[in-house]
Amino acid sequence: MMPLPWIMVFLPWVGALLLLSFPRLRVAAAVNIGCAASSFLLAIALFTVPHGEQGWTRIDALNLPFVLLAAFVALTTAIFSAAMIAGEGFDHWRIRAYHAAFQVFLGAQYLALLSDNLGVLWVAIEIATLASVLMVAVHRTPAAMEAAWKFFMICGFGIALALFGTILLYSAAQALLDAESGLSWAALKRVAARCDADTLNLAFVFLLVGYGTKAGLVPLHSWLPDAHAEGPIAISAVLSGLLLNAAMLAVLRAKAIIGAHPDTITTGPLLMALGLASVLLASLALWRRRDARRFFGWSSIEHMGIAAFAFGIGGPAANLAGLLHMIGHSLVKSAIFFGVGRAAQQKGSQKLADISGLIASDPWLGWGLALAIGAIAGLPPFLLFASEYGVLTAAMAAQPWLAATLALGLVVAMTALIHTLQALCFGTASPDLAAATGGAAVLAPLWLHLAVALILGLAMPAIFTGMLGAAAGIIG
Amino acid sequence: MTFGQLPYDLAHLLGGAVLLLSFVLLYQRRISAVINAFATQGALLALAAAWQGYVQGVTGLYVTAAIAFGAKAVLIPYALHRLVRRFNLQRGVDPALGIGASLIAGVALAGFAMMVVLPATAGQRALAREDLALALSVVLLGGLMMITRRNLISQVIGLLSLENGLILAAVGVAGMPLVMELSTAALVLMLAVIAGVFALQMGESFQSLDTESLQSHRGEGE
């Protein structure tokens, strides 16, 4: 029988083929939820698989939590999407294309997370790009086309650099590898200590900038806010919740290989520099946004910057904080997009100026969104508070001056977020232009994500604590 | 393998020719000339891949060469020429940076690629090193073309020629696994880009194939 991780990858793709044949909205949305739910169950089952490689996939402490997280966010997003999609007014071709692209995207995400082979990893990230471009462009308005084109060109350039880095990495290790182990991450990591240090360094720079593009790190971040502002809002939730994590994990895999050689450049300062630049740029950019989805897109750049900074510091404590931060960000950011989606639907606009007083008009939505924005700003008691605190303490011990700069960025971003929180949720309600559709299925995912982020922040189950601790060791 | 031996010399010549075509791409002023230069680059890339297949004795590289020739020297240029004719786009390339300045920047980038790759790969065979340096130059020149051209087709060709550089790098590293699969996957991405251009045109969202017309839709809108 096929190994379980392979099924995890192929199930969504089979689902995608199936979804191409459903022209009816209700049926397609239901099948979409069904596929996502089966993937979620499979992701839980993956915890029983012994760690190690199975052909071109691998299971270890680093990817398991993220596969489970991805499957969870995918399931709630599918439910949210089913409730909201009727408002998009799609014809049957778009219904087919949208749902199929969603599942293709998910399969590519699982493949990117689970792959042991760096070539397969690259192909997975590429497929994810193609599928998400399609979903971003699905409305085919000029703005959507512009966003999709930018996404395509910048990410095309980025993943080209990542492939060049992969080729360099192989060329460094070529003499030490046999044909079978090829581009295997585990094999490369084993032989890295005997490779040529300079070639490894060069490869890392390309991999960092390449996959960093997809993770939304400065300087190739500019596709991200635009892509988050177009397409059905469920797409923004999975872009922030899944795609950025998969790309960041690819960077971490590269870091682990390079770090296995004693004489390479320390990869930390590079990651810290890109991370800090992302945080500072985003914290200022947040003040200038007028579009709600673009605003939270910029906030994703900030949070990936914080995570990159944490991995740059390195060591068990900082790595753990970085991983926790990625998990918390995925959960809370997708919750925010659920809330913003509902609000934009009610107000008939996604401009920040057109949305206000949500608590007065719809308390469940208003309070949910308020809590979620508070959580993303790093307020206690959610997971992001714990992780940001962890990053800052680790930074303070390692690099006090950089820690102070990071703290400055965090505070500037936090005030921007709180400012937006007040404008969106409090005050007098702006008039509703459309009746809310979808009922509880729209808000339940939001509150569920908040609850999970709360539980993980206060009392993380021991199995995850142990696993993430081991994962922090893998990154090195 | 070093200078004066046929496998090395010919591989070096073909790699250099691919890079030369990247420069040719940079100074064309007409779209159809850009497409023709790209087709020539694709054909040279196919030759380079086939020669590496012969030298390394890897049959998979012949397949890579055949795919590169079929797609990059024939199919894609044909599709682009049709696109240009059908939507009547016979005009200049609208460089955002002048032709002379682009060439100077191109020379600087090629020099930069040599300076970065050659010292960093000192431990490897000469052929692999030079191949990587040439390939990185092609990659960077493709990126330069993407940045300095406003015309949509020129930008696409910049990305396509950038990808030629990747294939050149992949075939030059002896024993690299998955070369065929990776080059095919990269090709799918490129075909999708071209399909995207078609979609942009068919949707009649824009009157011209000029990214300037997209600019007004970017960001927050003014």
Image: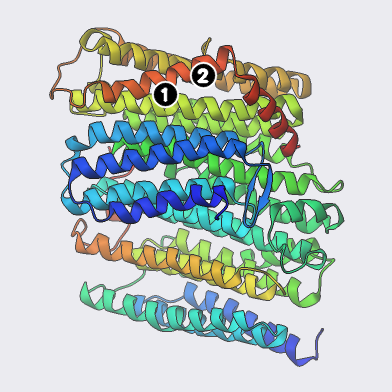
Q: Amino acid at mark 1?
A: Trp
Labels 2 & 1 near each other (Cβ < 8 A): yes
Residue under label 1:
A287
Residue under label 2:
A412
Q: Residue at x 53, y 67 (%)?
A: B162
Position of residue A390 relative to residue A36, above or below, is above
A206 or B17, which lies in front? A206
What residue occupies the far front of the structure in this picture?
A: A1
Residue A280 appears in the rendering: no
Position of residue A74 relative to residue A166, above or below, is above
Position of residue B17 relative to residue A378, above or below, is below
Position of residue A472 relative to residue A214, above or below, is above
Residue A354 appears in the rendering: yes
Say yes or no: labels 2 and 1 on the same chain.
yes
Q: Residue at x 79, y 91 (%)?
A: B5
> What is the chain letter for disc 2?
A
B14 or A38, which lies in front? A38
Q: Residue at x 46, y 53 (%)?
A: A10
Q: Amino acid at mark 2?
A: Val
Q: Residue at x 39, y 14 (%)?
A: A419
> What is the chain letter for disc 1?
A
Residue A142 placed where, x, y %?
Answer: 24, 49
As helix, strand or loop, the secondary structure at mark 1 comes to: helix
Is A307 displayed left or right of A440 in the figure? right
Q: Which mark is residue A22?
A: none
Residue B153 placed where, x, y %?
Answer: 36, 68
Is A19 displayed left or right of B76 in the figure? left
| Neighbours of disc 2 within 10 Å: few (<14), some (14-19), many (20+) | some
Quadrant location, the N terminus of chain B: bottom right
B183 or B31, which lies in front? B183
Mark closest to the chain's N terminus, 2 or 1: 1
